[in-house]
């Protein structure tokens, strides 16, 4: 596997005072943060905190009302899209097609033009998510967890240096959740950067850095250890830390 | 034409081929409609006069319906969002839809045409290949129309509402059932703005008067203009559909 994280210099993601409204509804307000290359960055918060909107801004599906976003040193656009992997919250697969047809389609779209390389990558990622035996099954016949796995395979088939994963572990059984996190760790070790949204603190513990979100704002940023320590209680869990920062208001402990 | 356009078109064709029920409907529904027209029209000469116009209308109707619902479903299932986050351009996406759905719109067109010619025994003049080329042009317009309006609709219910709003009025205004020249002036003006008028005029000129493609340059030009304009509009408004 190549080390995709070394393909371009600078921070993987930079956001400066980013705000976004849906009509009159404020969804994100003044978010500023940077994500160094080669780490997993968790966006943690309850439903409605603005995690999905932030990810959609970062992949270029939405444009910020105010502020600037840089992704791999460029504004989010089709020019940089081939370096990005995106796994939406819904599995977002073509239900009539088989798993292998779905993955092959995204391999072609993401410029894996060499036939042999494409075949090799498609086979590798389907095996990686443990779906090789089901590769010819229609997606509509798959369970929720299987769809999540197939969706992940589509997002990583082109070996992107930057991955946006919107609630990737929702609907997975505990064993598969561990498998996913092992794989995410192997990706960051190879130099890739992962931005992962979640609303469960189990996921948070696996991330290198975290941003706690609430009502469209970051209430705290730091490593899991830093966020726990900042509560002043050595035994504090990440859940305790989240509740602590909600009460305290905005903090940057990193 | 880019490789991405072909990749998207191939995917759409694969999707529809694997959906056997839809394929069955693509084949059977036009046959049912054509049969109903055939048995309900009392006079053979009326059928000969009506058939070219009905052919143009049915191509528009089925092309619009198939494309509109399919593109909308792609948006509501989230696959469009995934595609919009990828390196493909909006023109690639719309071009891919056009190619992919056009194939099925053409299959329906050919089924209706040959059923009318060989089973209902309608008379026609003009070169067969030229008539089919013109039908392809109407099919392209229908697919572009369906793609554009699917971008404006937010769910299947809204998309279906576009049929009585966009398609059915053309049945009454564009000379399918009675001549445009017998309608009030303001309706004639409106008819001249609608694409089906040119589809109907072109089909009648070819099938009833034996004219060729070179003789219906105006109809071809207007339909091609409509198709290009709708294709560009669909590409321009696609992002709006995703960000909702």
Image (spheres, rainbow, N blue to C red):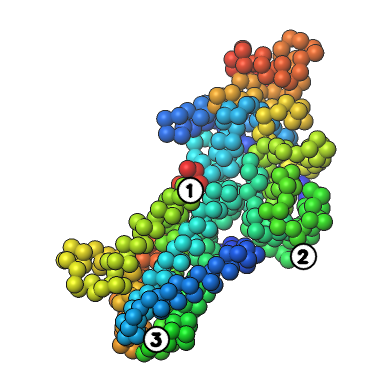
Q: Which residue is mark 2?
A: A116
Are tags 1 and 2 found on a single chain?
Answer: no
Q: Earlier in the sequence, mark 3 or mark 1?
A: 3
Whole-number angstrom distance, CA of label 3 to CA of label 1:
40 Å
Q: Position of residue A143 (x, y in %)?
A: 73, 47
Residue at the limit of the structure toward the top, as seen here: A232
- Choose between A88 and A163: the one closer to the eye: A88
Circle 3: element type: loop
Q: Is residue B149 left or right of residue A139?
A: left
Are tags 3 and 1 found on a single chain?
Answer: yes
Residue A216 picture quarter: top right
Q: In the image, is residue A203 above or below residue B157? A: above
Whole-number angstrom distance, CA of label 2 to CA of label 3:
53 Å
Residue B122 numbered mark, or none: 3
- Taking the spot 24% from the left edge, 63% from the top edge, the residue there is B190
Q: Which residue is mark 1?
A: B155
């Amino acid at each position: 596997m190549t080390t995709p994280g070394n393909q371009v210099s600078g921070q993987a993601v930079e956001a400066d005072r980013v705000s976004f409204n849906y009509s009159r509804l404020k969804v994100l307000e003044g978010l500023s943060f940077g994500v160094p290359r080669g780490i997993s960055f968790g966006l943690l918060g309850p439903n409605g905190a603005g995690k999905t909107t932030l990810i959609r801004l970062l992949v270029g599906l939405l444009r910020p009302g105010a502020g600037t976003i840089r992704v791999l040193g460029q504004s989010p656009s089709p020019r940089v899209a081939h370096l990005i992997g995106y796994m939406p919250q819904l599995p977002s697969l073509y239900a009539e097609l088989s798993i292998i047809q779905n993955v092959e389609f995204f391999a072609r779209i993401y410029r894996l033009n060499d036939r042999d390389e494409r075949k090799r990558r498609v086979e590798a990622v389907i095996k990686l998510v443990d779906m090789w035996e089901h590769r010819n099954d229609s997606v509509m016949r798959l369970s929720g967890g299987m769809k999540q796995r197939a969706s992940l395979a589509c997002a990583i088939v082109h070996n992107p240096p930057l991955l946006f994963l919107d609630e990737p572990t929702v609907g997975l059984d505990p064993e598969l959740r561990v498998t996913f996190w092992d794989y995410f760790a192997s990706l960051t070790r190879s130099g890739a950067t992962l931005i992962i949204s979640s609303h469960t603190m189990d996921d948070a513990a696996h991330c290198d850095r975290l941003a706690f979100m609430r009502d469209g704002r970051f209430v705290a940023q730091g490593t899991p250890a830093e966020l726990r320590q900042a509560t002043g209680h050595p035994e504090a869990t990440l859940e305790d830390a989240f509740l602590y920062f909600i009460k305290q208001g905005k903090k940057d402990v990193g | 034409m880019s490789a991405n356009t072909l990749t998207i078109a191939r995917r759409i064709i694969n999707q529809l081929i694997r959906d056997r029920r839809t394929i069955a409907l693509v084949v059977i529904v036009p046959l049912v409609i054509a049969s109903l027209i055939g048995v309900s029209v009392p006079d053979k000469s009326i059928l000969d006069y009506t058939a070219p116009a009905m052919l143009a209308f049915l191509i528009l109707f089925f092309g619009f319906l198939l494309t509109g619902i399919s593109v909308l479903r792609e948006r509501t299932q989230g696959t469009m969002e995934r595609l919009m986050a990828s390196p493909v351009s909006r023109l690639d996406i719309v071009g891919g839809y056009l190619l992919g759905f056009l194939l099925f719109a053409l299959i329906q067109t050919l089924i209706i045409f040959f059923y009318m010619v060989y089973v209902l025994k309608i008379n026609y003049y003009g070169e067969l290949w030229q008539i089919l080329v013109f039908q392809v042009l109407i099919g392209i317009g229908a697919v572009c129309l369906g793609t554009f309006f699917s971008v404006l609709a937010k769910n299947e219910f809204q998309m279906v509402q576009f049929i009585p709003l966009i398609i059915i009025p053309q049945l009454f205004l564009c000379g399918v059932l009675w001549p445009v020249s017998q309608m009030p002036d303001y309706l004639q003006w409106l008819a001249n703005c609608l694409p089906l008028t040119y589809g109907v005029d072109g089909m009648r000129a070819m099938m009833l008067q034996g004219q060729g493609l070179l003789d219906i340059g105006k109809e071809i030009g207007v339909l091609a203009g409509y198709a290009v304009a709708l294709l560009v509009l669909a590409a321009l408004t696609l992002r709006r559909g995703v960000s909702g």
